[in-house]
């Protein structure tokens, strides 16, 4: 081909690029102050921790689109000649929302036309239709013509759904549970850099239970104290930083959230506060104190001391923890999490992990699980004991007549976590992630009990199951009194429960 052909081809490409720039939503979008700082971040990890209505999801969507289209975190250099417009290879990205409905209604429409783009969205989707090869609704996977792949996931899928090959970018729209973040943070392959980008308000979206205290403790507190990792950037923003917010809308929001409230400070002013201050159930827990990174079953489990199995019978996830008492210290060695299945599968998994032991197994749990169901004519403990039958060591059920007040259970756990004089009597192994997540994020309700949710779309629905089991064990073995314990049916049941902790007898309790 002659030189004229290449000149004509180049001129045509330049003309086409110019025309597309004039209608390209990513090119036309104009970020403001804090958004610019977030876009320009070169660190491996960056979080935009702003108030509501500060364009956090827009900014995150722009990063996902730019990375997939151009290979740049910041979309602007691709257009102004400061970077490569076409990347030398395709990238793989996970875009993670708290739930799939939130992904469908909030993040996806900002990135591409998923047929749910709201009429009032201030910009068109950042990835034009002509660059899209395929949208697979079944796998929630968007494939671009340049080979880039964006997989939309939700935090409520849990840790198991976030395992796989390496990624180039993981983008969080709102902060996920820490166990989900940890799983995503290791999606690195040799020779490829992983970028983590997150956009969050330090209060969950309206209608969603739970919080992000781990983000405050793990990222914000060290940052504020000056202990700033070189590969981390945090960017803050208040609603007043957004030049596009109408004054009457700001006044409406100011009327909703009273002056001096935590909601106003976080949702409007963008102040970095641990939004669950005074509301966490297990406030004595500190991961840097209670999680021992070198604790292992192979090195520290005593073959001649009893195993303590603490569980709470839930449909999903069905969880249990395996402990030993070493003097005054309780050590949690194993965590069993059954995502699909129940007590039968839990029993099978325990048998697989502990086929032999040199002392008894003591089982702790919810007294209400002793009830026989009409469907099976068995209690949860009947099912569990049936699965454990035949193990070559004795098993004892350690159950109260009735459950103690929830506050007693919470008090017992907190006392074990940090007792008189600050004594720490609980130690978790590094694999006990669900339990650690519970201890960090389980909330109290307005009555001082434990906040629950049965809405699977809410990431908080996974919480409380694992710590409830531990609570049943501690309140049985190491009860701490409360006013509630001194009245009602538990007043007599408590002394019975404490007095019948088995020592030499190995008969199954009923």
Image (spheres, rainbow, N blue to C red):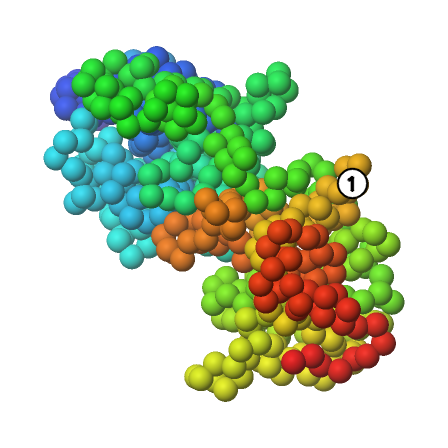
Q: Nearer the viewer, residue 131 or 407?
A: 407
Q: Is residue 229 left or right of residue 251?
A: right
Q: Quadrant of the N terminus?
A: top left
Q: Nearer the viewer, residue 290 or 349?
A: 290
**Residue at the front extreme of this rendering:** 487
Q: Residue furthest bottom?
A: 377
Q: Quadrant of residue 224?
A: top right
Judged left or right of residue 303, residue 184 is left
Q: Is residue 468 above or below residue 213?
A: below
Say which residue label 1 marks. 420
Q: Position of residue 12 (x, y in %)?
A: 15, 22
Q: Quadrant of residue 185?
A: top right
Residue at 62%, 64% in the rendered image = 490
Q: Position of residue 488 (x, y in %)?
A: 58, 63
Residue 320's place in the image compared with 80, above or below, is below
Q: Position of residue 472 (x, y in %)?
A: 64, 61
Residue closer to the observer: 314 or 151: 314
Query: Compared to 369, does 16 lie above or below?
Result: above
Residue in the picture at 70% in, 62% down: 476
Residue sitting nearer the eye, 304 or 499: 499
Q: Is residue 312 something one can see in this rendering?
A: yes
Circle 1 — which element? helix
Q: Is residue 123 left or right of residue 236?
A: left
For residue 185, say whether it is visible: no
Quadrant of the image for the C terminus? bottom right
Q: Residues within 10 Å of mark 1 (few under 14, many from 20)?
A: few
User: Which residue is pictured at 40% across the width and 57% down the height?
Assistant: 454
Name the residue rendered at 54%, 58% in the picture.
465
Residue 396 on image: x %, y %: 73, 75
């Amino acid at each position: 081909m002659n030189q004229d052909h290449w000149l004509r081809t180049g001129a045509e490409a330049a003309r086409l690029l110019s025309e597309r720039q004039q209608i390209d939503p990513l090119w036309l979008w104009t970020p403001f102050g804090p958004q610019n700082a977030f876009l320009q971040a070169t660190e491996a990890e960056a979080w935009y921790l702003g108030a509501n209505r500060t364009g956090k999801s827009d900014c995150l969507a722009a990063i996902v689109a730019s990375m997939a289209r151009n290979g740049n975190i910041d979309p602007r250099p691709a257009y102004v000649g400061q970077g490569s417009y076409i990347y030398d290879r395709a990238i793989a990205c996970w875009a993670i929302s708290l739930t799939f409905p939130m992904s469908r209604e909030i993040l996806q429409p900002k990135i591409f036309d998923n047929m749910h783009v709201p009429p009032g969205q201030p910009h068109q989707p950042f990835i034009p239709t002509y660059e899209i090869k395929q949208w697979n609704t079944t796998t929630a996977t968007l494939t671009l013509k340049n080979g880039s792949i964006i997989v939309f996931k939700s935090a409520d899928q849990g840790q198991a759904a976030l395992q796989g090959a390496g990624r180039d970018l993981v983008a969080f729209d709102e902060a996920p549970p820490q166990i989900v973040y940890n799983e995503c943070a290791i999606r690195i392959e040799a020779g490829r850099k992983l970028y983590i980008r997150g956009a969050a308000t330090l209060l969950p979206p309206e209608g969603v239970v739970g919080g992000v205290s781990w983000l405050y403790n793990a990222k914000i507190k060290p940052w504020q104290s000056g202990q700033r990792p070189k590969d981390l950037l945090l960017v803050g923003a208040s609603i007043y930083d957004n030049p596009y917010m109408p004054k009457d809308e700001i006044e409406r929001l100011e009327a909703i959230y009273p002056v001096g409230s935590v909601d106003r400070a976080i949702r409007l002013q963008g102040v970095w506060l641990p939004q669950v201050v005074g509301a966490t159930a297990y406030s004595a827990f500190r991961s840097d104190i209670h999680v021992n990174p070198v604790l292992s079953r192979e090195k520290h489990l005593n073959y001649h001391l009893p195993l303590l199995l603490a569980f709470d019978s839930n449909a999903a996830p069905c969880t249990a923890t395996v402990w030993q008492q070493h003097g005054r210290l309780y050590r949690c060695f194993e965590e069993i999490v059954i995502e699909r299945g129940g007590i039968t599968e839990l029993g099978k998994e325990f048998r697989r992990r502990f086929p032999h032991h040199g002392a008894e197994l003591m089982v702790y749990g919810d007294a209400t699980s002793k009830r026989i169901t009409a469907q099976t004519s068995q209690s949860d403990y009947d099912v569990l004991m049936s699965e454990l039958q035949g193990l070559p060591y004795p098993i004892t059920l350690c159950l109260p007549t009735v459950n103690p007040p929830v506050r007693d259970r919470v008090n017992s756990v907190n006392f074990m976590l940090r007792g008189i004089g600050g004594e720490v009597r609980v130690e978790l192994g590094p694999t006990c992630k669900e339990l650690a997540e519970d201890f960090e994020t389980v909330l109290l309700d307005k009555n001082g009990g434990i906040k629950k949710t049965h809405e699977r779309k809410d990431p908080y629905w996974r919480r409380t199951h694992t710590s409830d089991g531990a609570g049943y064990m501690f309140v049985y073995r190491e009860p701490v009194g409360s006013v509630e314990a001194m009245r009602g049916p538990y007043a007599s049941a408590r002394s019975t429960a404490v007095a019948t902790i088995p020592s030499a007898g190995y008969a199954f309790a009923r």
